[in-house]
Image (tube, rainbow, N blue to C red):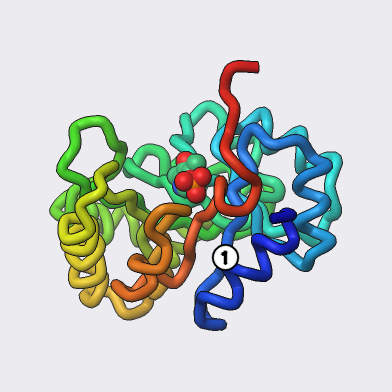
Amino acid sequence: MSISENIKHIHSQIPENVTLIAVSKTKPTEMLLEAYEAGQRHFGENYVQELVDKEAQLPKDIHWHFIGHLQSNKVKYIAPFVYLIHGVDSFSLLKEINKQAQKNNRVIDCLLQIYIAQEETKFGLDFKEALDILNSTEFKELKNIAIKGFMAMASNTEKEVQIRAEFKSLKEFSKQFPNYSVLSFGMSGDYLLAIEEGSTMIRVGSSIFGERNYTK
Ligand SMILES: *Cc1c(COP(=O)(O)O)cnc(C)c1O
């Protein structure tokens, strides 16, 4: 199927209140344009340089989501235009985003990345660390960031029961913060299940653009 057919197909499966982010890392701008022409406006990228290059080349009404692991020293490159930063996993990163947002005279929307997987390799805060940040006075002093919700990745497993339990744990946690209503979880392999468990934002790459090739 073509990119536009893939996007149509996914939209036919998901409720209207769920935002579909087309994850376009490693894919050439022509493919992003094809998705754009099919009406897609939310794109997700993992690498700062790649995001900056694509932003410069593509239409200005695209909402760019940064979904990768963000290093503090690179925030400045995306601060002028980024729409939502998903992977915030420390207070120091939040502080740097606030600083760069201030320089650009704007408020940058962020999601705290929460560690829900039973694996050692994923980034993110545990629930206690997230609570400590959100309840701290230092956090309340940051005027140029706005927390919109939470992002997470489930374990890389076929076990549906486990993936569901991980998503459920985040949904439960988020209920303490009704104002932080965005929940970003679910990818190509599990987005339908993720929506059943409360996701409001799915990040879908290979089901739209095909498999990624990292070897070139
Ligand atoms: C690459 C990536 C995705 C998309 O993965 P697919 O399985 O191709 O849909 C989603 N979220 C994050 C954080 C990613 O790095």
**Total marks drawn?**
1
Cβ of mark 1 under 8 Å from ligand 1: the answer is no
Position of residue 99 relative to residue 142, above or below, is above
Q: Amino acid at mark 1?
A: Leu
> Looking at the picture, how far across and down is residue 62, in whole percent?
75, 58
Give the residue at the far top of this rendering.
Answer: 216
Position of residue 72 relative to residue 130, above or below, is above
Q: Is residue 111 left or right of residue 210?
A: left
Position of residue 36 relative to residue 71, above or below, is below
> Looking at the picture, how far across and down is residue 93, in whole percent?
41, 39
Q: Is residue 109 left or right of residue 140?
A: right
**Residue 142 lies in what quarter of the image?**
bottom left
Q: Is residue 74 visible?
A: yes
Crowding at dot 1, Cα within 10 Å, few <14 / some 14-19 / many 20+, comes out as many
Q: Is residue 14 left or right of residue 199?
A: right
> Looking at the picture, how far across and down is residue 57, in whole percent?
85, 41
**Residue 185 lies in what quarter of the image?**
bottom left
Residue for point 67% across, 38% down: 51
Residue for point 68% across, 48% down: 104
Residue for point 32% across, 41% down: 90
Q: Is residue 180 visible?
A: no
Residue for point 25% across, 53% down: 133
Secondary structure at badge 1 equals strand
User: Which quarter of the rendering shows the N terminus?
Assistant: bottom right
User: Which quarter of the rendering shows the C terminus?
Assistant: top right
**Which residue is the site of mark 1?**
20
> Could you say which is closer to the camera, residue 23 or residue 100?
23
